[in-house]
Image: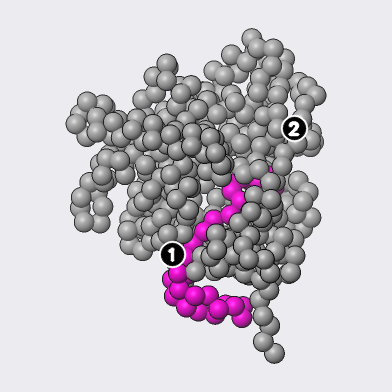
Amino acid sequence: MTVKVPKDRTIDNTLAIFKDGYEFISKRVQNNHLDVYETRVLGEKVALLSGEEGAKLFYDTNRMNRKNALPGRVLKTLFGEDAIQTMDGKAHTHRKLLFMSLMTPEALASLKVITNKHWDQFANKWEGKKKVVLYDETRELLCRTACEWAGVPLKEKEVEKRTRDLSNMIDGFSAVGPKHIESRRARKRTEKWIEDLILDVREGKQQAQKGTAIYEMAMHKDLHGNPLDARMAAIELINVIRPLVAISKFITFGALAFYQFPRTIAKAANEDDYLLRFTQEVRRYYPFVPFLGARVDHDFTWQQYDFKEGQLVMIDIYGTNHDPRLWENPDEFIPDRFLNWNGGLYDLIPQGGGDYYKGHRCPGEQPTIEILKTSFRYMTNHLDYEVPKQDYSYSLRKMPALPKSGFIIKNVHRQ
């Protein structure tokens, strides 16, 4: 007997994305105990995927491509037009190797040292403050960290501006009205700033160390042996810096986890293995990326659903990280669930799934984990602080999500 994949009965569900937020896909797919479900967004038929099997299909480069998969509003704010997130085939693999070349053990060790240094500097400053909004402070901390690690010169007088612009690019992709317009303006300013630096490196006006992101982006050649357009090189360099600034959300959620689950503090402070498990659980449990899009490469049938060439497909990032088929008690914060985790490529997907080199898994996942481990280690080993009464709730309807207070701490002292 043929089983029809269910679909939304309404004409269009674009508004439901803003209503349901992070749960837009899981409310439809998982509520029906499926991996695929049909809906319509902006008048277009869309296949929604969730769970491990859905992720395997979504990241199958033989069946899916990224051409025209991301809305213009996302490219003009978050990722940049024609960036690596929009590429496929040999061109994507070649560009991906550029990013992965930055993730050497030596580079990641350097990132740890740089991150720790900036935590020390900020902690020293916090000791003189009545209160600290952790999210606001760590955005600047990570802007400084990301630029230093990438080899991007950052003048003291422009730190606030660059931090604000990078943050607006992250926060404005799903916004409407003035906030979205400002997000686009922030991207234009940032691209111009980085493009000028790329040109200075190429012309010898700005020194850059081989192996740093700014040097490698400036000197990279495409498959045909041609240097990247300076603006394109700038866009990809921003795709190194911006995601590291976005980690401030994970740090804020991690601080919330320490507060809500205080038994985790001593273990994270003293056990390296547990610190990694805590970091992974922060990335799994708290909302970060809601979903991503791709296009069907050619007609095929999967789980009795007919995928059509060019059809939009969306993968449920948040829902897969909370899929009860994959995670026992998924709505509970349990770092030790990773004690026996096999490191699957399609179950823990806060920054995408699949293979780093041939697929579309985010190359920034490794530095993300390193920064988070370093930050959580510093917070548990070197900081004493109090958490005053505040509204640290967050809404799954707001994308990207964040505790409403930004997580306030006071009476900060270094240990």
Taking the spot 66% from the left edge, 46% from the top edge, the residue there is 287
* Magenta highlight on residue 297: yes
Taking the spot 77% from the left edge, 51% from the top edge, the residue there is 331
Identify the residue at the far bottom of this view: 1
Q: Earlier in the sequence, mark 2 or mark 1?
A: 1
Measured from the top left, where is residue 210 in percent x and y? 29, 36
Q: Which residue is mark 2?
A: 392
Judging depth in this view, the residue of 33 and 347 nearest the camera is 33
Q: Is residue 279 visible?
A: no
The kind of residue tagged 1 is: Asn
Q: Is residue 272 above or below residue 46?
A: above
* Magenta highlight on residue 188: no
Q: Circle 1 — which element? A: strand
Measured from the top left, where is residue 182 in percent x and y? 49, 33
Q: Circle 2 — which element? A: loop
Taking the spot 37% from the left edge, 43% from the top edge, the residue there is 236
Region of the chain picked out in magenta, as a range:
283-310
Q: Which residue is mark 1?
A: 65
Residue 196 is left or right of residue 27, and the answer is: left
Q: Is residue 51 above or below residue 211?
A: below
Q: Quadrant of residue 132?
A: top right
Q: Quadrant of residue 7?
A: bottom right
Q: Residues within 10 Å of mark 1 (few under 14, many from 20)?
A: many
